[in-house]
Amino acid sequence: MSYLNNIRNFSIIAHIDHGKSTLADRLIEKTGLVQSRDMKEQYLDNMDIERERGITIKLQTTRLKYKANDGQEYILNLIDTPGHVDFNYEVSRSLAACDGAVLVIDATQGVEAQTLGNVYLALDEDLEILPVLNKMDLDSARPEEAKAEIEDIIGLDASEAPKISAKTGMGIDEMLEKLVEVIPPPQGDPEGKLKALIFDSYYDSYKGVVIYTRIFDGAVKRGDIIKMMNTGKNYEVTEVGYCIPGMLPADELKAGEVGYICGSIKQVADARVGDTITLANNPCDTALKGYKKAQSMVYCGIFPAEGEKYENVKDALEKLQVNDAAFNFEPENSAALGYGFRCGFLGLLHMDVITERLEREFDLDVITTLPSVIYKVVMKDGSVKWIQNPSNLPDIMEIAHIEEPIVKADIMTPNEYVGSIMTLCQNRRGKMIHMEYLTKTRVQLHYELPLNEVIYDFFDALKSRTRGYASLDYEFLRYQQARLVKLDILLNRELIDALSTIVPEEEANAKGRGICEKLKDIIPRHQFEVPIQAAIGQKVIARETVRAYRKDVLAKCYGGDVSRKKKLLEKQKAGKKRMRQFGQITVPQEAFTEVLKLDDGK
Amino acid sequence: MKENTGIYIHIPFCVRKCNYCAFLSAPSDERTREEYVQSLINEIGMRSVTDVCDTVYFGGGTPSVLKPEQIERILDSVRTQFSISEDAEITIEANPGTLGDDNDSALSTLKSYRRMGINRLSMGVQSMDDDRLKYLGRIHDSESVKRDIALAREAGFDNINLDIIFSVPGETLEEAMEDIRQIAELEPEHISFYSLQLEEGTPLFEQWESGAIEEVSDDVDRETYHRGCSMLKALGYEQYEISNFARMAEHDGQHDGQHDGQCDDRRSRHNSKYWSMTPYVGIGLGASGFEHGTRYRNLTKLSDYEAAIRDGKLPVEEEHVNTAHDNISESVFLGLRRIEGVKFADVPLEEAGLTRDEKGFRQYYKEAMKDAHSFEETGHLIIDDEGIRLTETGIDISNSIMALFV
């Protein structure tokens, strides 16, 4: 019997917070090669940001060994998946490396929007799906209702879904038995021509780029010359092995297996995630299907802050890019902020994570500008321009019309919040397509929303209006014509290009006023009055003034307590570091990202 | 010129805590005070200064809640332990209404101060408006101020400071001016004129936080300050620091040969040490000191302080050995508090391997000087070949200018 029969390659998919990472931890503890005392909580979420936010962004993979009731030992390759709508592409790559998926459903919550989204992604890859009911240790667990939802909403047979508690370890053995039974072993020919999928990679300062791969056909070992089918570049393999999840070198990786490959790959952009690896002297005929290049949906500028070096930021962005096929950047020059980069992201969370990593892991001081979607600008001469930076919008006189990206948004919510969600979507220029009752109390709303309205703080607004109960999933639908104008902001009568935005014409006045008011609160007082103006073209539509600073003085130096006074001054100085200087005007860096987070109530 | 060391002695007692006061001070009983005096004397015995000391300053709290006999014992131990120059400036802070129950006892207190060598009296008058005094939580009224000053003169005090507080919530500009006028009429040699700061943990701060009272607006506060400064100058006081005014050398030094003009200079010699990086010893609860390039602060909890003394340990809570940068930056931002500003030659730039002159200064503060020049352009700072100083409008935003140099 082939060794393939004893391998299972699978992912765990779930809605955010349904316990995916906890389950992964439990599996590693039970069957992994790591001692439980060495485990950090949520082993697979290995970035600080992930652990803090309780979400998985970066993929991890690990090899487990399980001795089943049939007496055989199985190799289980667990490929972790990110748990946020922004990272659907990363999920799809992980899934492509699998043969099946464990679908975790929180028995206290039931099916959520992302549960559905992830199931569809898994079905796209023809994966066998094993539904599992989690959090069964809680009194509020409603397994029968959750099962009914799985069957009614998703259409999967849930009658034999294992009931587990990832937290307490309850039901894990039964789940593993079921997993071995339901999920099929990988197919593949170890004697065939090498065909392997890169589903993740990261840069290691000692080994160069480390590629996570699933071998479909053939085998690869140290000394082989491999070829990346997309980039066409060749590398000599220096090491192959398994992830446990630490690196465990092996003699070779062969068809059906999951592991890592190192090849002194220095040029980070050459290990494109989604690419197919084959042997240079014996290549396979066609690359693996299903690779779609990640589409950036949201763009923003990232600029070195005062005193930060451009080169340092560039190096860091390059390093981040190797781990992240969905992140891209190119040089950009802003009149206000100088030399920097225009960066593309999958969504706002993705953007937050990247900028936070720049600050934490690379210790860089950067300024991020307002996020923007990509606008399709049709010129009067018939040509089309794609604009992802509002300040690059061509002269209005030459524009025939502008189109903006529209997404199909699926919002799942308990029925009592339908009213306030409809108000929210209406305020965000949403168009309701239809509404359906999934169960008696659970409603799914289908909306078409301009992406521009979703990227700012839609998710926060949704959560706050529904006490966290509503869930959102969205995907790009089409470009659609809209009446849009460029809104400029002038500080002290100078145009600050990094604050320009594209807004719907009928909302321009309100938005302009809102931004001016917000800036008035954010910008500190100066020694002189600072006028803040919002303008469309030459026409000023809103104005606020930051009054001049009159007083910043300590009357007394208390009884010779110089240290206290000094601490105050040091604090004042440190505060100034987070500021950006525009001529005579000092603007806190938060101004560039906070300014459009306008409360819907206003 | 090497400057002499100063001695600060903190007395953390008062009759009642004022509504704006965030100093280490509280009402006390007789036994607590006597124990504290004993601790002070023991602490003084542990301190050592080899240089001559030419100022002693009893600050508080309200030092005058101690009995004159207690002050004298403290002063005696200071004289035993330290070498106090003959012409030392010895100041005591006293609040109106705390010197004695009646005129006779107040006069007797003041006379004993004089006898033990105290030659400068600093009175926390704050206002001459009885309603405002009540609002601030002061225990005195304007009549007792007049009386106490007359008695001080009778006892022989010829160097008196009066504190004026302005920007009390609800106070108008005119009322503030009236306070200055009335306080100047008492003809003190020195006036401290400072704006009320709402400090966390005080009753006024809490009222402000709850919205019960409103702070005087920055605009009124600054106008009061500037008009107050002009009035004080017109009345013959010279401003030598952001909040301090003094009578200066009336005779211009030409009057007689025995005095060199300095003798009529009523600037506070003790406080001036804080602004010129001169060493000072801090004694007592929470007192700060600066000796041998080290800044320290004593324990701030009375029981901890006394326990340390009982164990024969110096009651120091925090200690920081100044780096070259500390010395340079402190000399600049403290110097900027003086009206004459900071002279390049007074900044210890040699500690950073530079010369004590404009060139060295500009080299050390290469980045800061860019911002400094923009403050110069807006008229907040004067930079010449000797040094830098704040203008009158620069004082209003002095923190942001000083912050450049820390």
Image (cartoon, helix red, strand yellow):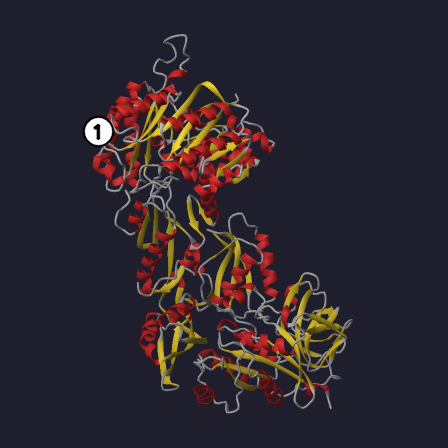
Q: Where's the C terminus of chain A, which quadrant?
A: bottom left
**Pick the front one: A445 or B206:** B206
**Pick the front one: B305 or A10:** B305
| Residue A146 visible to an observer of this rendering | yes
Name which quarter of the figure residue B219 lies in. top left
The answer for which chain carries disc 1 is: B
- Residue A165: image location, x then y, percent: 52, 80
Q: Residue at x 33, y 59 (%)?
A: A514
- Residue A552: image location, x then y, percent: 37, 40
Residue B180 placement, left or right of A468? left
Find disc 1 in the rendering and name its residue.
Answer: B143
Q: Where's the N terminus of chain A, which quadrant?
A: bottom right
Name which quarter of the figure residue B198 lies in. top left
A433, above or below A344, in the image:
below
Residue B310 placement, left or right of A200? left
**Pick the front one: A563 or B175:** A563
Residue B11 placement, left or right of A28? left
Name which quarter of the figure residue A51 lies in. bottom right
Amino acid under disc 1: Glu
| Residue A557 visible to an observer of this rendering | no
Q: Residue furthest right?
A: A223
Which element is circle 1 on? helix
- Residue A513: image location, x then y, percent: 31, 57
A449, above or below A597, in the image:
below
